[in-house]
Image: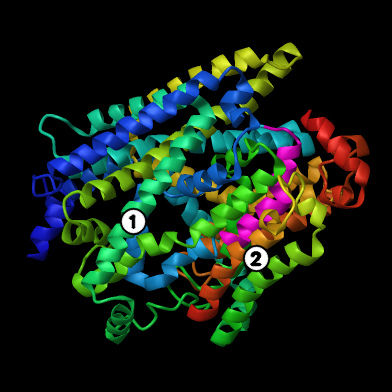
Amino acid sequence: MEEQLAQAALGQSGDSVLHAIDLVIIGIYVVGTLALGTFFGKYVKSAGDFFVASKALPFWAIGMSVVVSDIGATDFMTLSGAGYKYGIAAANFDWMGSMPAMAFAAFIFIPYFWRAGVFTIPEFLGKRYNAGVQLIHASIWGVFLLVMLAVMLWLTAVMLDSVLHIEGIGKEHYVWGIAVVAGIYTVSGGLAAVVMTDVVQLVVMFVGGAALSILCLAEVGGWTHMTETILAMPGHENHFTLLLPHDSETPYPWTGIVFGLGIVMATGYMAGNQAIVQRTLGARTEWDAKGGMLLAGFLKVFIPALVIIPGLAAVILIPDLKNGDDAAPMMIAKVLPPGLKGLMFAALFAALMSSVDSTLNSATTIWTSDIYGKAFYYAKGKRPTEASLLVLGRICTVAFILIGAYFSSFLAGKESMYTFVQTALAMFQGPVFAILLLGIMWKRANQWGALAGLLLGVCFTTILYNSEGVFPSQDPFLFVAWWSFIFSMIVTAVVSLLTPPEPEEKIRGLVFGQVMQDGNMQRVLQERVE
Amino acid sequence: MEETEIVAEVAAEAQQQDWLGATLSSFSEGINHTFSGPLKTLFSPVDRLFIGADPAVFKFFAVGLFVCTILWVMLILKKEYVNIDQPKKGLLYDLRLWTLVSMSPHMIIYWIWS
């Protein structure tokens, strides 16, 4: 019986798990998203309109967009699976991984990016340090975002194929279908279209996820009965404990969660991820940028309730699952009636589309602004015009979605390539956060310190990642993030002190202490924006 | 052909196809061989400090991180800096209150479940 259920849920039985009403709901969702996204195309007249939505985004749109960009459909599967295997400790990545970090981002980093009037974080690093730091950061993110785009397209296609089972349509067809839908509204409306479709996608995700969680809880007799039953099962004693001991073999030791995740990885992600920060750069005021991040932090409280409860319910209803990641699709098949299945599927689709469009838009911004813009400046000695940047932005969007679609099936068979790029990015996170933090907080930090901190920090991270048995956890990436951050801070500080300081003019308005103490600085910052 | 030879040939072919994986693997082994010993010696005092810590310590650090962040925003940062460009005056538009409201659920969750 369970095997049949698993096959049906995962679409392996050859039959679609969806009914006609589900397909109608999905169809309405896709057409509605396309119409809403292309509507914003008529407001795009310049590069500023395309990349930072004319700096007109309100706080509520920013907050909702940040949350939905951060969640992919695979998170529904993997977080639910982690909840099945480890319990609520899996929620640490949404709870400890969001709120202190989003407050730090809102009140330390975002105001500086926003006031500096930049499109990207590498651009900010270029202004604060030098072109070398900017190019290293931009190149890593540019490549990472492109690979992620291809992977997301492929994962979406796999999910669509497994659920819809339409004869004669394969995964490649779904890849091109998604590429066309997401590509059209991203090319047409830029960041505004991406953010506004994200708002709708968040609502769909919350409604679909809440329906699944509520029905799962009803199926297991409510929260209290579920916790009592699970805690009484052998091997599940820690299923409702968030922080586990330092020597826990799970990926959630408390030291890693508080220091590695809460202080370094989450803050580095919220302040250094182009896809997240780009929304706040498009804010209509600095207050909206900060408020958007705080709203996002508040909304993130609810995410584990949507994605982990199905995994916890599956511990009782399907206790012998071989792969925890099958818990969510099996619970969808088991508890949702026709109509709600369509809504839940639309929610998964929404999560994927929001990740694809955000990644596409951010990749385009980095390649256009940092890589092409910098190369143009060196070749011609001047900045490219607004009109040329807008045209190039649109060309890049089309090119990247085509490249992503073309390479998606290629990457599916080359797991090591994907792992390599993802690991490379993870290795940069601690060092980049260290130079970003010192750059904003300490005026003595200079370009040579930053370059040394970044490069030696990455070397140190590489060594830590590849040295076995150094940390108690089997998957020590949280410890690695913390120690590489500390190492890079020390290197940046020492090298900065041994080399000449930056000229006052260069760092004016880019260091936190100056802004807090100097009233005139506010006017200087305002002039930068104007 | 012997069965072992066939297995070896298939393995070699697979490795050739995934050259990136093989290169990364040998690189990783080299680093592990050279550095894992000294690094274990360096980090073992830290492990000894935290292994066996009472769960109350976990809670103190986790909840403390939230409390410190709230206090930093509400008491240390200047009100004008926090609320620059505030659309209207009043408590509802005060981002210090927003910080308290948005962080409290997280803090309560860690207080209860850690």
- Specify how the rendered protein is coloured: rainbow
Question: Which residue is drawn at the image coordinates 37% and 71% (left, top)?
Answer: A86
Question: Which residue is drawn at the image coordinates 43% and 59% (left, top)?
Answer: A303
Q: What label sits on residue A338 in the rendered view?
A: none
Chain under numbered label 2: B
Query: Of the residues shown, which amino acid type is indicated by label 1?
Result: Gly
Chain under numbered label 1: A
Q: Is residue A102 highlighted in magenta? A: yes
Q: Is residue A27 highlighted in magenta? A: no
Q: Quarter of the image containing the N terminus of chain A?
A: bottom left
Vertical placement of residue A48 versus A379, above or below? below
Vertical placement of residue A234 versus A513, above or below? below
Query: Of the residues shown, which amino acid type is indicated by label 2?
Result: Leu
Query: Where in the figure is residue A8, as x and y percent of width and height?
Result: 12, 53
Write down the residue under mark 1: A209
- Label 2 residue SS: helix
User: Is A22 in front, or is A232?
Assistant: A22
Query: Residues in magenta?
Result: A98-118
Vertical placement of residue A496 versus A254, above or below? above
Write down the residue under mark 2: B100
The Cα atoms of the two marked residues, 1 and 2, are separated by 27 Å
In this picture, residue A45 sits left or right of residue A519: left
- Tell me if residue B11 can be seen: yes
